[in-house]
Image (tube, rainbow, N blue to C red):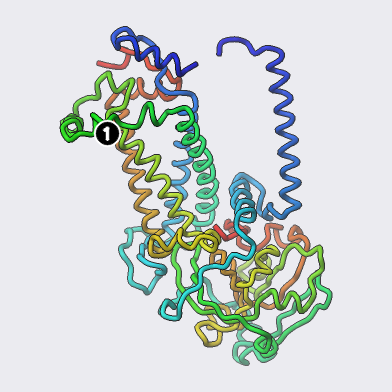
Amino acid sequence: MAQSAYLASRATRVSEITDTVRHSGIVRVTHWINTLSFFGLLVSGVAILIAHPRFYWGETGGLGTPYLFELPLPYMKGGPSGWGRNLHFLTAWISVLNGSLYVLSGILMRHFHKHLVPAKADLTGGSLSRVVSNHLRLKRPGVDTEHSYDVLQRLAYLTVVFIAFPLMIWTGLAMSPSITSVFPAVVSVFGGQQSARTIHFFAADFLILFLFVHVAMVCAAGFKNRMQAMITGRISHGKDRA
Amino acid sequence: MSKLPSRRKLITAGLSAAAGASGLVAAARLADRYGLIPPDHGGVYGVGQTLTYASQRLLVPERSLAREFNRSDISKVSPVNGKPPESETYHRMLAEKFADWRLSVDGLVARPASFSLAELTRLPSRTQITHQACEEGWSFIAEWTGVPLSYLLNLVGILPQAKYVVFFSFPEKSFPMGRKWGSLDMVDAWHPQTLLAYAMNREELPILHGAPLRVRVARQLGFKSLKYLTRITVTDTVKNIGKGLGSSSPERGFSWYGGI
C-alpha cells in the first residue's frame, strides 16, 4: 500500500530516504487529467471570449450599453465560439467528473487532512511571515518540501481546490438559463448573469496565475525531480539537485 | 504491482469488462428511449453534448420557469445577430405588412393547418419579460408576447409518436438548406414559456428581431429562438432533415441543445 510506505518513510530521517512515495496513484492520475482538461477549458474559453471580449456588470450588456472593460482583442463573430463551446463543455465535464473523483477520494483517504490542511502552528503571524519572506527572497525550496508542503503551498492548493474551481463551476452554471430556471439564486447572488460571466473570467485569470506560479515553483524546486514525483509517484534524491 | 495477474483476476476483469460494455449498450438504449440523446450526439464533442442534454433532461423539471423580470428591467438596447432574409418574397411581404403571410403547421398532426398573422394574434396569448443571452456572451431583457406553442400544438392535435417540433425560416441563399431551420424536443415544445412571438416590448416584432413571427425558447440561448418563421413540422426524427443534426446551427459548428 502506498499509504503505509509513505507513512513509514516519514518515520525515518530524511537523510536515509533514497526512494519514497510522494503522490498516491489517484492524485497523480487526477492531476494529469485535470491538466489536460484545464488546457482544453483555457483554449476553448479564449475561443468563446473573442466572440465578444467585453465585460459587464448586472443582468444584461451588449454593444451600445455601458460596460466595465474591454480586452484589446478583435471581435470574431460566428467563428471559434462554435467549436469553442463544444470543447468547453466536453472538457468541463471531464474536469468536473475528474475533480469530483479527486475531492471524494481526498476526503475518504484523508489526503486533504494529512497533506494539505495546515497545522495551527504554521498559521501564526511569525511562522507565515517567515515562509513568505523565504519565498520573497527566492530561497530555493528545501528538501523538506519534497515530502510535505509548506503552509503557503497548502493554502494555495486548498484555495484552488475548494474556492477557485467551485467558483468556476458555480459562475458557469449561473450562465445557464436552464439551470437558473430551477435555482434562480445561483445567478442572483452575483447580481445577474453578466456579473457571473465577469466573475467567471476573473476566477479563470486567478487559475492561470496559479498555473504560472505552480510551474515556476516546480522549476525552481527541480523540474525533473518534481515531474518524476507526479508521474511515477516516487522521488529520488540527489539526482536533480546541484 | 509487480506480480502477474492470476487467472481468477483475468476472468473477473474480463467478465466485468463485458458487463460494463453491455451495461453501456443498455444505458444507451434506455437513454434513447427516454429522449436523453440529442441529434448531434456523434463524434467527440457529441459526448459533451449528450452529457449536458441528458443530465439537464433528467435533473431539470420539465416545467421549471425561466426567470421573469419587471418592466423596469427591460433593456434599452436589444442587440441582434444576423440580417433579415434576403429573399424577394420576404421583402414583398414586409412591404405588405405580412398581409398574405401564413404559418403552415404539418407533419405528425391530426389536423394540418395554416394561420395568418391576424389569426395568430386572435388566439390566447402570453406575455413574459425574460432574459436572453447570445452564445457570444452579450444579453438583454425584453418583453415578448405571442401564442404559447403548446396552444397551437393542441389545436392541430399532436400524434403520440411526435418527438421534435421543427421550425423553418424564410429562404436565405447563404444557408446550406436554403434557409435557417431549428428544432425543439417535446419538453421545450410543450413548455409554458415557449412562444410563437409576434410582439416585443408591446410593439409589433421589429424586422431585426424576426418579423412577423419568431420562436421564443426561454430556457435556451438566443440562437434557439428562430426568427422569420414560415413553417412548423412535427416529426418523430430529424435524421432526414439537412445533415440530421436537428437544426442548422450544428451544421455551422454550434450545439443543437442550447440550455447550456
Looking at the picture, tell me which residue is in the foreground, B260 or A123.
A123
Q: Where does the image place residue A213, in percent across and percent down from the top left?
A: 30, 36
Q: Position of residue B21 (x, y in %)?
A: 72, 34
Q: Amino acid at mark 1?
A: Leu
Seen in the picture, residue A118 relative to B191 is either above or below; the reply is above
The local crowd at label 1, few if under 14, some if 14 to 19, many if 20 or more residues have their Cα within 10 Å, is some
Up/down of B2 relative to A135, above or below: above
Placement of the N terminus of chain B among the 4 image quadrants: top right
Residue occupying image coordinates x 70% and y 88%: B119
Q: Residue furthest right?
A: B110
Residue labelled with disc 1: A152
Q: Nearer the viewer, residue B248 or B213?
A: B213
Q: Quadrant of residue A39?
A: top left
Residue A235 rendering spot, x and y as whole percentages: 38, 17
Q: Quadrant of residue B150?
A: bottom right
Q: Position of residue B257 (x, y in %)?
A: 61, 59
Check the image and report above or below for A45 versus B94. Answer: above
What residue is shown at x 73% (from left), y 37% (from top)? B23
Whether residue A28 can be seen here: no
* SS class, disc 1: helix
Q: Is residue B242 above or below residue B54?
A: below
The disc numbered 1 marks a residue on which chain?
A: A
